[in-house]
Image (cartoon, rainbow, N blue to C red):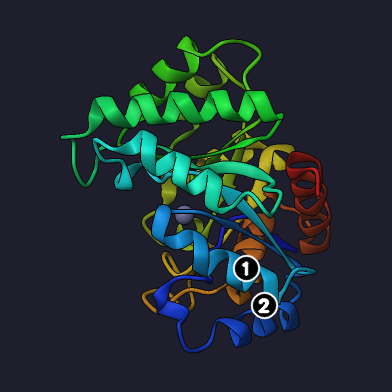
Amino acid sequence: MIDTHTHLYTTEFANDSDSAIERALDSGVRLMVFPNIDADSVAPMLDLHKRHQEHTRIAVGLHPTEVRASWREDLNAILKASEAVAPVAIGEAGIDLYWDKSMRVEQSEAFAAQIKIAQERGLPVIIHCREALDEILEVLQAAESPLPKLVFHSFTGSASDVARIREIADPMFGINGVVTFKNARELQEAIPAIGIDRILLETDSPYLAPVPVRGKRNESSNLPHIMKKIADLLNLDPEAVEEATDSNAISFFNL
Ligand SMILES: [Zn+2]
């Protein structure tokens, strides 16, 4: 399995990031993609990647909740600081109006700028979208075509959200532990609409631990719980889901 979105380099793993990677490998996760958050997260992300180059890849970008008035300088600093390692994607980037709406315009601008960078570099974009689907689709519609490859990471929407998104793009959907939650009926019903060809597995560690470890610190070794839940929802063998999502991730990120 490939964990396409995991932040094992953050302070939550300050004491055991190396063993978290070992535990992931033991659970059958052979590759992990680290999306960047802000200018401060680049160094710890690169550090952990350098210690586990065979099993980790990086994405570079500025997370929407970290967008400030100085986002251009911050984004440049991130790109410069990560220059030595080739990223597999731009991200995470997007719009998040759940925590704070005051940077709405700047978040849209920073997202548009990162789409442009992805187009110039021929890289996919990892989209973080929280309470901002209208705004995200607006930016995608205004962007130059063809759009880069896209993944809606931590997708928790409904089948009708999937249909709306597909009027504008044909992205992948990153599915995490939320799909195992009892109250995630809408998302569970959206999984067949998304279809196995458009699903990427992710944990979003350290957040959103799946059932049966919900509420605890999440780590990449929990990915099999998510994979098995998707197999249940699609009536497929876990092996078939593992194989399909592996090949989705390999072709999406060009791994
Ligand atoms: Zn993330």
Element under disc 1? helix
Do the numbered discs 1 and 2 sit on residues whose CB atoms are within 8 Å?
yes
Element under disc 2? helix
Up-down relation of residue 75 to residue 113 (above or below): below
Q: Which residue is mark 2?
A: 24
Up-down relation of residue 73 to residue 86 (above or below): above
Q: Which residue is mark 1?
A: 223
The type of residue carrying mark 1 is Leu
**Viewed as shown, does residue 41 lie left or right of 26?**
left
Front residue of 125/164: it is 125
Q: Residues within 10 Å of mark 2 (few under 14, many from 20)?
A: many
Q: Residues within 10 Å of mark 1 (few under 14, many from 20)?
A: many
Up-down relation of residue 125 to residue 56 (above or below): above
Number of marks in the rendered image: 2
**How far apart are labels 1 and 2 at the CA level?**
8 Å
Label whose residue precedes the other's in the sequence (1 or 2):
2
The type of residue carrying mark 2 is Ala
Q: Residue at image x 66%, y 48%?
A: 200
The dot on residue 170 is none
Q: Is residue 160 visible?
A: no
Q: Residue at image x 41%, y 66%?
A: 207
